[in-house]
Image (spheres, rainbow, N blue to C red):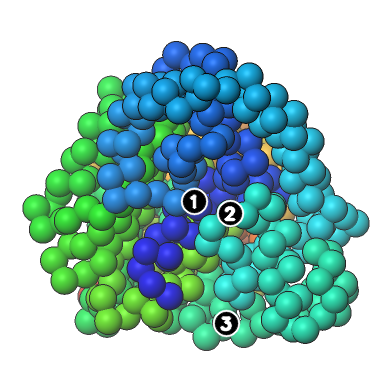
Amino acid sequence: MRWGSLLAIVALLLGAAPALAQQSLDLMPKIKQKATAPAAAKAVAKKPKAKTAAPAAVTATPAVPRLPMPRPDAAKVDTAKPAAPKSSEAKSFETKPSETKPAEAKPATPKAAAQGNSALDAFAGIPPAERLRIQAALLWSGDYPGTGNGEDPMLTAIKNFQKRKKANVTGTLTPPERDKLIAAAREREQEFGWSVVVDPATGIRIGLPVKMVPHAREAARGTRWSSAHGEVQVETFRIADANLKLAALFEQEKKEPATRKVETSVLRDDGFFISGLQGLKKFSVRATIRNGEVRGFTMLFDQMMETIVAPVMVAMASAFSPFPERSAPFAALAKSVEYGNGLVVSAQGHIVTDRKLTEGCQVMVASGLGDAVRIADDKDSGLALLRVYAPRKVSPLALNIDAPKSGELTLIGIPDPKEQDGSRKLTEIKARLVDGISIELRQPVPMAGFSGAAALDGQGRFLGMMEMRNAVLASIEPAAPPVRLIAAATIRGFLDAHNVATAQTQTGDDAKASVVRIICVRK
């Protein structure tokens, strides 16, 4: 695949990715513009006029706001466009303005309506979860069109798949065709080690070719995944600044580092996309802004790997969701220094925490209490038992409340120091308990350092401990619960098995006093 065609597909998916995250049928129709070009031209113009709307459909200018085909200087063209079409189009249509306008206006609406219904027709009767798997599989199969022809892109992709398989080209997949498509995509994903996870440092949902970028470590504003020798790199970033101007960040990303040479740049109201050369590597940056916070990721790869990376970039664009409402497991990061939470459960200094947090630690510290030693763990429950000797006065939890099957929760914990400028203040995150075990976050917030936090009910009573799951999620599979509740009853059983006497009543003012930061130091 040539680099120019690849960029066209990736830019096309830039507008599509949020819709995929919301399980919407508008995943692909959202970004097509050809049939409704007059409306697109009005949206770009600062002061649209009725007499210029019709000519816009005849000229080539609608390609500017249409994201599927970005130009190297697309941002500049967008800015200059409102003035240019008016003069040229007015001259070209002086002889017969009345003939052209009715001809374009009448067919536009029914054609757009037909395209809008095509996605619904293609997926009629298919459950939402399977619909997402089919959409992701079509992206992996290479059948998705790089350019628009007036037809719904997803419908075109289905027809392309049927043509390749020499089947009847109907635009609707039969059950056997769906099975073959998903099976082929699953093989491709296994080849690359494809997984869709939430980056705990930024809250971004991102698709990663884990076999291609197996090494993960912290970055200045997020997380970096890379290959053994840095041939391929993926780095997330999050910038929370109420005064941040997206246009200013857009210009900064085009110039920094100084080795960047921009080939394509698209600035929208809610985000941007930049690509080109950075030294000897290809690069792309995509970002989205919401409520004064920008989230995005940068990808770098050697030019000689372009044909290998090409299908991965398309899949990553479809999986990218900066503010996801649909959960995914959290990315597993092996950090040299990792932060989490522990819960004091006895006056003798016993602390329970997430077992994964304690793995491979050379030194563990319970902040404010001293060095901690792991004395027991249980793989099935996901719990680890720590002990702080000669502790200061502590406030052990009362574990006598059983969790309900559902209801509102408040998660209480101390996040990673990077989230608090180095401090260790308790933070509350609103959530909801589902099916007695799964925890759904109310907002897609960064969760770095939050595993092991306490889960409280509406009255402030302790219901259990929060565990962040690091299991990966293939993009064509439904999401597993990424955050789960380890109930108070499970913790009681674990402590009873190790002869730890627990408090029957809360000795402190509330359960918040029992939460401590746990620091794990590895080699």
Quadrant where the N terminus is found in the figure: bottom left
Quadrant where the C terminus is found in the figure: bottom left
The percent position of residue 168, horizontal first and vertical second, equals: 85, 76
In the depicted structure, whether residue 51 falls above or below residue 260: above
Q: Residue at x 58, y 30 (%)?
A: 38
Q: What amino acid type should be assigned to the residue bearing mark 3?
A: Arg
Which mark sits nearer the N-terminus, 1 or 3? 1
Q: What amino acid type should be assigned to the residue bearing mark 1?
A: Pro
User: Which element type, helix, strand or loop, lies under badge 2?
Assistant: loop
Residue at mark 3 = 188
Q: What amino acid type should be assigned to the residue bearing mark 2?
A: Gly
Which mark sits nearer the N-terminus, 2 or 1? 1
Q: Residue at x 62, y 85 (%)?
A: 187
The percent position of residue 486, horizontal first and vertical second, equals: 64, 56
107 to the left or right of 389: right
Instruction: Report whether residue 15 is seen.
Output: yes
Residue at mark 2 = 148
* Tag nearer the camera, 2 or 1: 2
- Which of the 4 image quarters holds residue 462? top right
Query: What is the spatial separation of the Cα atoms under label 2 and label 3, in whole angstroms?
Result: 26 Å
Marks 2,1: beta carbons within 8 A: yes
Marks 2,3: beta carbons within 8 A: no
In the depicted structure, whether residue 329 falls above or below residue 33: below
Q: Residue at x 60, y 65 (%)?
A: 144
- In the orientation shown, which residue stands out farthest toward the right? 125
* Tag nearer the camera, 2 or 3: 2
User: Which element type, helix, strand or loop, lies under badge 1?
Assistant: loop
Is residue 353 or residue 140 the one in the foreground?
A: 140
Residue at mark 1 = 68
